[in-house]
Structures are given as structure tokens and as C-alpha cells.
Amino acid sequence: MNSVNILLVEDDPIVAFVHVKQLEKYNYTVFHALSSKDAFAQVQEKGESIHIILMDIDLGNDLDGTEIAEEILKSYDIPIIFLSSHVEPSIVEKTERITSYGYVVKNSGIVILDAGIKMALKLYHTKKELLEMKIQAEKSEKSYIDLMESLQEGLIIANELGFISKVNATVCEMFGYSNDEMLGLHMSILYSNSADRDKMLNNLTRDLFLKNYEVKLKCKDGAIINTTSNIRMLIDANGHVNGTQGIIRKMN
């Protein structure tokens, strides 16, 4: 972002003039609103071109700064910093329930205000990036599950404690369980004996990935089937084990 557009909501023209001149010296573009009504109108008009709002609390009209901030945030995703002479804990706590982007006491000076603006924008963009990453991860996971549902192989995912968290229709058909029945079951229920289960876990812990691993597994009705699987340990970016994933095929 080359330039930052600020909406300053301040009902005192003299105070507003001082803030505008100080902020402009720091290369900010400043729009000024004298009232809550004017602030909302400018947000409606300018929309995303407003990058951050500096909101006074005492606006001397129908809605104070906290109230108009809540109204704005119902429709617009814009970071808001409260700029006020109030230092009472109850006021500060109220603003924290509305927005997490900061509270600057008036007359703190332009250096403090500039730092607050930069921190708020950094936090805002970090939140946006994390949200986008979460959305993309959810899309990727859904696409992966959709793909596995279309294949003949069975997909089964268990958490770090061994409890089943995801399966596809092929696995359910293979073992005779419904999807609801399988979710929450412990993986040990599918093994014909504990020795086979322990052997698989030891091998997986050592190698992290097992290709074409053959093992006898048990269906809901007690029938034993021969299977071959590709099994991998699920490990996050910090090296923590989140569970296991298996692609299972029934052998003739």
C-alpha cells in the first residue's frame, strides 16, 4: 500500500485541524468527519478506499464514537482506532470489545499515534492473510476429500490419539459401517489383533510413510479382509504429529 487513507472522526474543528496537519506531515491522506452521521456517510461513499478510522468517543450528537463504530463494523471491515481523552478502565474495556486495533489517548503526540496506526494496519493485514490461508486450506481439504470420494480406494484419517476423524464412502462400504458409525471410533477396532496394530505403528513412527503395507483388517460383522495401504504420519509445520492418513485397498 503506497498511501494510507485515514478517516478522522472528531467533532472539535480545532482539534481535528491539528491532527490533520500532523498526520499529513507523516504522508497520510486524511478525510475528516465532524459527526457520527457524517462518518457513516463517508464510509458509505468511500468504502474500501478508507484504510483506517481514527474515532473520537465524545462526538456531541446522537451516537458516540463506540456506537457509530459498532454500526460501521456491521457492514464494513475497516480497522478502527479509538482516539480519546478518556482513560477510565470501563471506557477502554468497552472499546476493546468492539475492536482490537487499539486505543490512543489524545495529546499522546504524533509519534505515538503514527506507531499506533502502523501497528493496527499490520495487525489488520495479518488477520486478513490468516483468514485467506484458512479459506484456501479448507478449499484444498474439501477438494481432496471430494477427489477421494470419487476413487475406488478408501480414505481414512485419524487424529493423534488414533480416533477416526474422516472417512470416505469406499471405507464405509469396505468395513460395513456407516459414516456416522465410523467417526469417533478408535483405529484399533479395525485390526484383527493388537500385534498387527502395534507393528504398523512402530513401522510408521520409524519411517513416517508406509507404501503398499499389507495387513489383515476386521469388518463390522467380524469378517477378516486382506488389505494393502499407503499410510503416512500427519505432521504440522512445527513438527507435531496431528494424526495419520491411510489410503486402503481391498486385496482379492
Image: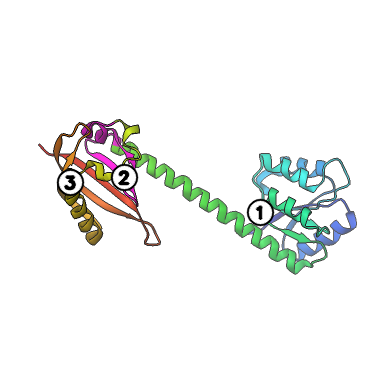
Does the image show residue 53?
Answer: no
- The residue at the point 50 percent across, 48 percent down is 132
CA neighbours of label 1 inside 10 A, class few (<14), some (14 to 19), many (20+) = some
* Identity, as a three-letter code, of the amino acid under mark 1: Ser
Residue at which label 2 appears? 157
Q: Secondary structure at mark 1?
A: loop
Horizontally, is 141 left or right of 225 in the view? right
- Quote the CA–CA distance across marks 2 and 1: 37 Å
Magenta-span inclusion, residue 58: no
Residue at the disc numbered 1? 100
Residue 48 seen in the figure: yes
Q: How is the image coloured?
A: rainbow
Which quadrant of the structure image shows residue 170?
top left
Residue indicated by mark 3: 193
Question: Callout 3, which amino acid?
Answer: Asn
Location of residue 34 in the rendering, given as x and y in whole percent from the top left corner: 85, 48
